[in-house]
Structures are given as C-alpha cells and as structure tokens.
Image (tube, rainbow, N blue to C red):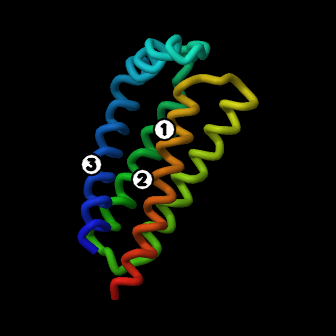
Amino acid sequence: MRLYKIFSLTAAAIFAVVGLFFLFFPTSVLIFFNSISAYFKLPQSPVQGAGFYLILASAYMYLVTLLAYMMYRYPEQKIYPILLAHGKLASSLVSIYLFLKHQPYLIYFVNFVIDGFLGIAALYLMKMKETEV
C-alpha cells in the first residue's frame, strides 16, 4: 500500500507539472526534444501548429493528474488505476504507431516508453495492493 500511495502522489505531481509545461511552454518542450534528436539520428519534429492539440494535451494531463491523485486519496478504489492505465497505455500505443508509421520523432518514442511504463506500473501496483490485503 505504501508503494502504491507514493507512486500515485508522485505521478499526480509530475503529471501536473508536465501538463503546465504543455500548456504554457509547448514550443519549449518540442525544442528540447529536437535538441537531442540528432544524437539518436532522428528527424526534428515541427514546432509550430500546436493550436488545438495544445488544448487536448493539457486536458489529458489534467485528467491523468486527477486520476493519480484519486488513486492516492482512495487507494481502495480499483477504478482509478484502471482508468489511468487505459489512458497511459492508449497514449503509448498511439505514440509507437506514429513513430513507426508517421515520423520517427524522439518525442514519440519517449512517450511510448514512459506512458507504457506508467500504464503497466499502475496495473501492477493495483494487483500488488490487492494481494497485500
């Protein structure tokens, strides 16, 4: 239970910070990933054109922040880690699809790895918590 609550609260804090970066500094996030893309011999992603997707990315980060916080606040509820896992795993799968089929941008691959890990971690911790009781 302790690891579950630490994961939940830490994830909520990180999701909130990342969401604020997406909202207030969207080009800086892309510029950062573009600056290290050359080390992996990957193309740079376009920096312009965030517009409408900025709304969706910020709203998504708000939602996953809320789900992680609700996991922390109500650890007995299974629905929160399940919903968080669905969101993160969906994001991960779309990211690897875009990496393979659209452009091999570093930011796509990093999101595939991080969101995939977070989705699996949420499910694993939920299962681990169930076996403690």
In the foreground, 110 or 58: 110
Relative placement, left or right, of 120 versus 101 is left
Neighbourhood count class around disc 1 (C-alpha, 10 Å): few under 14, some 14–19, many 20 upward = some
Q: Which mark is residue 57?
A: 1
**What's the CA distance linking mark 1 and mark 3?**
16 Å
Taking depth in this image into account, of 125 and 11 the one nearest to the observer is 125
Q: CA distance from mark 3 to mark 2?
A: 10 Å
Q: Disc 3 marks which amino acid? A: Ala
List x then y, in percent, for residue 84.
47, 60
Helix, strand or loop at label 3? It is helix
**Sequence-first tag of 1 and 3:** 3
Most extreme residue toward the right is: 101
Residue underneath mark 3: 13
Query: Which amino acid lies under the numbered mark 2 shown in the image of this protein?
Result: Val
Q: Earlier in the sequence, mark 1 or mark 2?
A: 1
Q: Residue at x 45, y 53 (%)?
A: 118
Q: Nearer the viewer, residue 22 or 55?
A: 22
Q: Residues within 10 Å of mark 3 (few under 14, many from 20)?
A: some
Q: Residues within 10 Å of mark 2 (few under 14, many from 20)?
A: many
Q: Is residue 21 above or below residue 120?
A: above
Identify which amino acid the numbered label 1 is placed on: Ala
Residue where numbered disc 2 is placed: 64
